[in-house]
Image: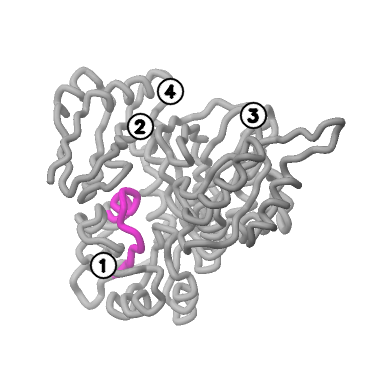
Amino acid sequence: MNIGTPFTKKATRVMLLGSGELGKEVAIELNRYGIEVHACDSYPNAPAMQVSQFSHVFNMLDEDELREAIVKCDPDIIIPEVEAIATNVLKEAEEIDRVVIPSARAVQLTMNREGIRRLAAEELKLKTSKYKFASTKEEFIKAVQEISLQSSVDDHFLPCVVKPVMSSSGKGQSVIRSEKDIDQAWTYAQTGGRAGTGKVIVEEFIEFDYEITLLTIRSKGGQWLNDDITTCCRPIGHEQVDGDYIESWQPQDMSTVALMKAKEIAESITKALGGYGLFGVELFVKDDEVYFSEVSPRPHDTGLVTLISQDMSEFALHVRALLGLPINNINFNGASASKVLKYTGKSNSVSFNDLDIALNGHPNTQLRLFGKPGLDGARRMGVVVSRDTTTEQALDTCKKVVSKIIPTFNE
């Protein structure tokens, strides 16, 4: 791997598709290696744009606009950091020798729940919840009945989960607990997908004990860098509200058997997707049974805890792997946790008050403000990360600090 110098003809140029808080951390890590970063998003002044050499604003779902931007940036490497991307254009770019991380195929499969579920359950035979896909309301009602109604003396309705096949951060996702919820769930799923109305997945509701994210890195390794190496970070437990990450902790306590199964699933799915970089593998755990849920071929929001828990964060690991550099070791610093600053309101300029008071008296605790230009509704605006003797103590510190930070919504 040869790296040039930014703003020169020999510059190594990276096109970052998605410039939110995760993209910002990726851009910072790319800058550590002297990479010329072109941060892209659908709105100006996004977080990653604030730490990149160049920024570009356009609709990444528009094939023509994305093609034009690729020609303009002339990148050596394209890093998708969000799911709302015209993936056909990524495939075209790959065919003319531009590197897509981890690959155009992996991005296409993982941004569509149908593609990744069929790969995991039907090709790789991984353990998943029962599921059905539906394109029409009639198919949807039938799918719900097949997943949720069990024949007995009286029909017993079991909860099921409904998601658009193309959505993120819990958008369009709901739980059907009785037949009266069916119409509302269908309507919500049709308004929450990235591509508007369309196909949905109906999943069996698993009464899991906990869910984890297993950050899994595929990198070059071996004596002569000829072998692909799979490395897993310690498991991350997390809490979600309406499908959106609120807090996380590392490590999640789990049995040796469950951890072994989790690593086997993570290695299987990431090997099938191929390419290099970090993947966020989401899993449900019930006793010693582990169920595959989803996978993101990029840093995961729950992995923000690694900003303090490891010597190399998930963002540093992602960049190192995608540049073709070996992952020799990951040093764990100790039990850690994270909690987001999520606010609801409307403002084009948010300010944060009492930061000194909030952080006072809390060692091994850090604050990251994302620098988002505003909010309209509910939005994550920052995160607190902390390290302590136990994850419970670390999370308690995060909650205390977050509770003392007062936002002001300016016009």
Q: Nearer the viewer, mark 4 or mark 3?
A: 4
Residue under pointer 2: 339
User: Is residue 224 among the parts visible in the rendering?
Assistant: no
The reply, left or right, for residue 250 in relation to residue 70 is: right
| Residue designated by label 4 | 391
Of the two numbered discs 4 and 3 on the same chain, state the one appearing first in sequence.
3
Element type at mark 2: strand
Left or right: where 356 falls relative to 14 = left
In this view, the mark in front (2 or 4): 2
The CA span between labels 4 and 1 is 40 Å
Camera sees residue 290:
yes
Question: Amino acid type of disc 2?
Answer: Lys
199 on left or right of 99? right
Q: Nearer the viewer, residue 216 or 326?
A: 216
Q: Earlier in the sequence, mark 3 or mark 2?
A: 3
Give the CA separation, mark 4 to mark 3: 19 Å
- Foreground disc of the pair 3, 2: 2
Which residue is under mark 1?
Answer: 57
Q: CA distance from mark 3 to mark 2?
A: 27 Å
Query: Callout 4 environment at 10 Å: few (<14), some (14 to 19), or many (20+)?
Result: many
